[in-house]
Image (cartoon, grey):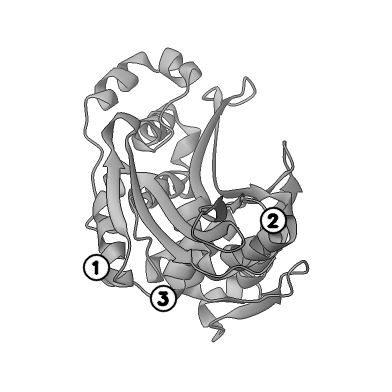
Amino acid sequence: MRPNSYNNTIRCYSTITNPVNEIPLVITPWFVTGFIDAEGSFILGLQERYGFSTGWQATCYLSIKLHSKDKFLLEAIQLYFGGIGSIKKGTNNSVIYNIVSIKEIDVIIAHFDKYPLLTEKRVDYYLFKRGVNIIQSGRHRSLEGIEDIVKIRAKLNWGLTDKLIASFPKIAALESEKVRPLVESAYVFNPYWVAGFALFFLLLKSTIKHCKRKKKKSGEGNFFVDIITSSTMKIGYQVILVTKITQHIKDEQLLKNLVTYFKCGTYYKRPKENAAYFFYAKTYLKIWI
């Protein structure tokens, strides 16, 4: 599927198999949205370039970074988007999927306009779109356009770099006083969004296999198996399956809604860390070792 035929394609999903665990992975539109809600970053880049009339180069791209063992997930998402973008090796055994081309960004925008993000990342997406519009219109070739991108960049999660603050001090000071807009949390979740957001059906299964083999606690993402000593069990051990989803405290309502959606688990927050959690633990009375 080519980017320019995206809107005319009746393709609703694609499948790929995890080569390690042989798990068939169904990639649906809502799965992609949920996955990027958890792992993706919308970036407006500004690099100083002396050869440009404004002295700055503006770029926009979507980036997803994972451990190299999960490369197949990035390949599945790339396949869903019709093969656009590139997957490259990163540092510390990571792989990164970037969609940089301004024409290919149109494919991303078409997707998220139809299947919107549900976390606070939706604000980043709206701001990102404004930056894309500036670049597509050619306004980034003027200093005024670059300054508008700086204003947008200041509201994104990553904010302004020290270099940008030093280069645009007035804008940085003004934008720091403005409150970042919030989005209304979802109360109804598409199951595929939940699967993409939490990767439950994939990571929990692979972690359980690993822990049975290693006979010790191990973790994978936010799902892990704990094997603890127990005086009440004949073999002296007890298994606990733990699910933990961590978000910025701005998404606390979304996590509370997940408790309602799953009809289990609890919500708690740590204000000092600006973090909120969805936590669920299940104790199993039998263990096979």
Label 3 sits on residue: 191
Kind of residue at badge 2: Lys
Instruction: Give the CA distance from mark 1 to mark 3.
Output: 12 Å
Cα distance in 3D space between marks 2 and 1: 39 Å
The image shows residue 37 at horizontal and vertical percentages of 44, 56
Q: Residue 267 or 199: which is nearer the viewer?
A: 267
- Check the picture and name the quadrant holding the N terminus: bottom right
Check the image and name the residue furthest to the bottom: 10
Residue occupying the point 39% across, 18% down: 168
Q: Residue at x 48, y 47 (%)?
A: 42
Which element is circle 2 on? loop
Query: Real-space Cα distance between discs 2 and 3?
Result: 32 Å
Pick the quarter of the image with the C terminus.
bottom right
Q: Which residue is mark 2?
A: 215
Q: Closer to the camera, 103 or 99?
A: 99
Q: Which residue is mark 1?
A: 187
Mark 3 lies on a secondary structure that is helix
Q: Nearer the viewer, mark 2 or mark 1?
A: 2
Residue 211, above or below 47:
below
Q: Position of residue 102 (x, y in %)?
A: 57, 52
> Is 110 rendered above or below residue 136?
below
Label 1 crowding class (10 Å Cα cut-off): few <14, some 14-19, many 20+? few
User: Is 156 located above or below residue 29 in the figure?
Assistant: above
Task: Check disc 1 and report its element: helix, strand or loop.
Answer: loop
User: Is the residue 162 above or below the residue 249 in the image?
Assistant: above
Upstream in the sequence, badge 2 or badge 3? 3
Tell me what residue is drawn at x 72 percent, y 40 percent.
Answer: 90
Please name the amino acid that badge 1 sits on: Tyr
Question: Label 3 crowding class (10 Å Cα cut-off): few <14, some 14-19, many 20+?
Answer: few
Name the residue: 37% across, 75% down.
190
In front of the other: 69 or 27: 69
Sequence-earlier tag: 2 or 1: 1
